[in-house]
Amino acid sequence: MKKNILFLVLLCFSAMLSAQKRNYNIGILTDYQTPKVIPLLTKLKSEIRSVVGEDATINFPEESTLVNNYNLDTALQNYNTLLANDTDIILAFGIINNQIISKQKLHQKPTILFGAVNRDFNGIDLTKKTSGINNFTYLVESESFKEDFETFKELTNFKNLGIAIDAPFVDVLPLKETFDRELQALQSNYKLIPFNKAEDISSNLDGIDAIYMAGGFFLKEEENIQLAKVFMEKKLPSFTINGTEDVQNGFMATNQSNENLEQFFRRIALTVEAQINGASLADLPVFIDYTPRLTINFNTAEVIGVPIKYSLIAQTDFVGEFKNVLSEKQYDLLSVINDALNDNLSIRADQKDVDLSNQDIKTAKSNYLPSLTASGTGTYVDPDAAEVSNGQSPEFSTSGNVTLQQTIFSESANANIVIQKKLQKAQEEIFNAAQLDLIFNASNTYFNTLILKTNTQIQVQNLELTKKNLQIAEQNFEAGQSGKSDLLRFRSEMAQNTQAMVEAINQLEQGFITLNQVLNNPINLEISVEDVMLDEGIFEEYNYDEIAELLDDPSLREPFIEFLVEEAKKNAPELKSLMYNLEATDRNIKLNSYGRFLPTVALQGQYNRTFSRSGKGSVAPAGFQLVDDNYNVGLNVSIPIFNQNRTNINRQTAMIQKDQIEINKENTELSIAANIRTGVLNMVNQISNIELSRVSEETAKEALELTQASYSSGSVNIVQLLDAQNNLLNAQLARANATYNYLINSLQLERFLGYYFLLNSDQDNNEFKQRFFEFLNTRN
């Protein structure tokens, strides 16, 4: 019985509370409405309901949300409509509504106005901390055109600023007076650009070197994107009074932070709650003290050519990707390899060594080509001697001869031809090795540049995280939950993170310089590199997962290593070069052994002609005849018997060279085996690193979120928060670089193998796999 009575009492008490809970109808007045505004109003309504909670039932009648479309008469009519219907609280937004409501001397219903663009030119007395007017309050932002202009001037040093503002505001606001004053203080001129649609702005950009969006809140997202493209095409720096969403869509900068809109909605909701709970609107604070936060689109600034001042980085948020949007060429891995093989200066110099070795072969073969020489002689002989020479040696004579020499057989010439061919083959293998090295070096440079790019992005994110933690520390300090030392520590941390980001950006630029050098590009050529994923693009068919599976199975790892060592020895150009050198040395030994007893056979012929005779002795005596033309032919056979013991010395030298080559060959084989085994172990490390770094990053991220929440409530100290942040930074760096390091180690293993899977056909790669399976079968 007692339980029933208690239940009835509670039921009655609940009914009494429900009866006391009042319904509030809130009317909303706006200047304009687009699809962009609807979700914002929905968010505002949700925020008000959430803050008011169980204190009242909040309604937003659809018929009490009215739009004036920038018309003063309509605005007045809308206001009177809400005064006449069952609206309990009026929320008014916009310049036009401000013109109507701020002039009312008596407010019949509680009215909250947010109608001034900013504090530069609203008609409200800014010295007042409250409205002091019954049933009326207003919200004033702490931002201003002046601060925007000063920041924009520091960024770009503009001289002629275009100011775009909604056309309906031109006749309502004291624009000329305000802009004249503020731009004159910056020693700059300006051009006012009223607009009703985006085309009014893009068609009126002549004579300016920067553009400031003083309006445009109601422009559609696609219109803002198109405007941003126009500004970038015309190399016009842009600054907007609107939020960071416009900066993400391509505008260069804004002073609006991400938290401003949420802070604004929360302030309206708190004001509504205060009114419902009996507070007087006349006594509520009117200022919303935003924290200005410069946000810059990194890519837009780079396109336009606006350098980011390091002095502003600590107070700046960045959006966009840290990629070179000015790049004249974007590289993927294959284009890097191909361009390096075609244009790299070192490989072109190595190619000349091959060309020179071909010339050595031609020189060796030229020993079997005929030699033809022609000569002429003019002779003067002592007259007395000429006179008694019977015409054979006249005082004056001219003569000439043509000599032909042809080697028919020469063991040294034969040996030299063979030796030079072998050396040429050896040089080709050296060139092949240089190409393999270049492929890896170019790929390594490419991946290192990607690592630097990723590190830059992560350092930017870490700086943003430090800024967020600093805000938490400031809130804790203001609430008395922490001391000033936390603020100082985070400010110091932010300075260090800023320096780390600056260094990361400069290291990325150095990476581009190194890549340009490898590709024989102009060092200042603007380039960019494409990100790679193991399961996307060219690596999707490459199928590195199969290698990972082989290395992950201990029973297959050792036979796989042995197979790779065998394949590497077959492919290694270094071994092939040594083999060709060994064959050349063997031929040299043969030459200086029994080959020295082989004769050298040569044919020689000469034709002689006397062209003129004069002076004494130029006439033959009686009975003698002078011959002006004659020739001779001879066969020369020579065998070296003793040439200062040089043949034996040359043979001994060749034997020493052979021993040296064989030692180098053995050492090279040992190095190949060691490199393959080391490369496989590095691959195993990187395979585990990919998965473990993913787990580590997820864990560190979750731990940081928990630590941030605990720090906000005062449950943990700053050291724990910093440790959590640094753990996340290290985990992100490890995760981001794990794939690149894995690919670098994979390509290094392929360099040791002398076979790049990426550069070979599917058929060749399948044959490689088949050889491995056959190798396994032979072991079982």
Image (spheres, rainbow, N blue to C red):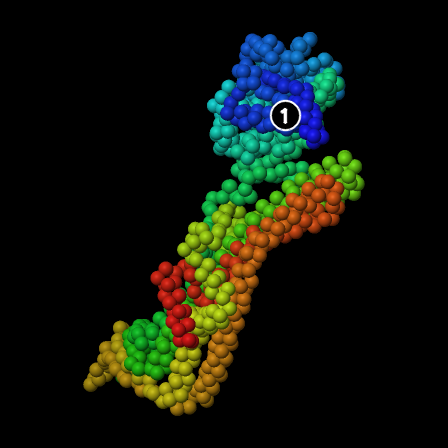
Query: Residue 355: in sight, yes or no?
Result: yes
The image quadrant where one finds the N terminus is top right
Q: Is residue 717 left or right of residue 183?
A: right
Say which residue appears at 48% left-offset and 82% top-offset.
Answer: 659
Residue 392 pos. (x, y %):
28, 82
Say which residue appears at 46% left-offset and 59% top-offset.
Answer: 545
Query: Residue 613: in sight, yes or no?
Result: no
The image quadrant where one finds the C terminus is bottom left
Residue 139 pos. (x, y %):
67, 21
Near-viewer residue (313 or 541): 541
Q: Which residue is mark 1?
A: 48
Near-viewer residue (736 or 390): 736
Q: Is residue 220 left or right of residue 83?
A: left
Using the image, determine if residue 466 lies above or below residue 135: below
Residue 212 pos. (x, y %):
58, 26
Say which residue appears at 50% left-offset and 25% top-offset.
Answer: 35
Using the image, determine if residue 738 lies above or below residue 154: below
Total marks shown come to 1
- Where disc 1 sits, the SS reads helix
Q: Is residue 118 left or right of residue 391?
A: right
Badge 1 crowding class, 10 Å Cα cut-off, few under 14, some 14 to 19, many 20 or more, is many
Near-viewer residue (128 or 208): 128
Amino acid found under the numbered disc labelled 1: Ile
Q: Quadrant of residue 169?
A: top right
Q: Quadrant of residue 29?
A: top right
Near-viewer residue (247 or 680): 680
Using the image, determine if residue 617 lies above or below residue 88: below
Q: Residue furthest front?
A: 1
Say which residue appears at 77% left-offset and 39% top-offset.
Answer: 481
Residue 295 pos. (x, y %):
61, 35
Q: Residue furthest bottom?
A: 641
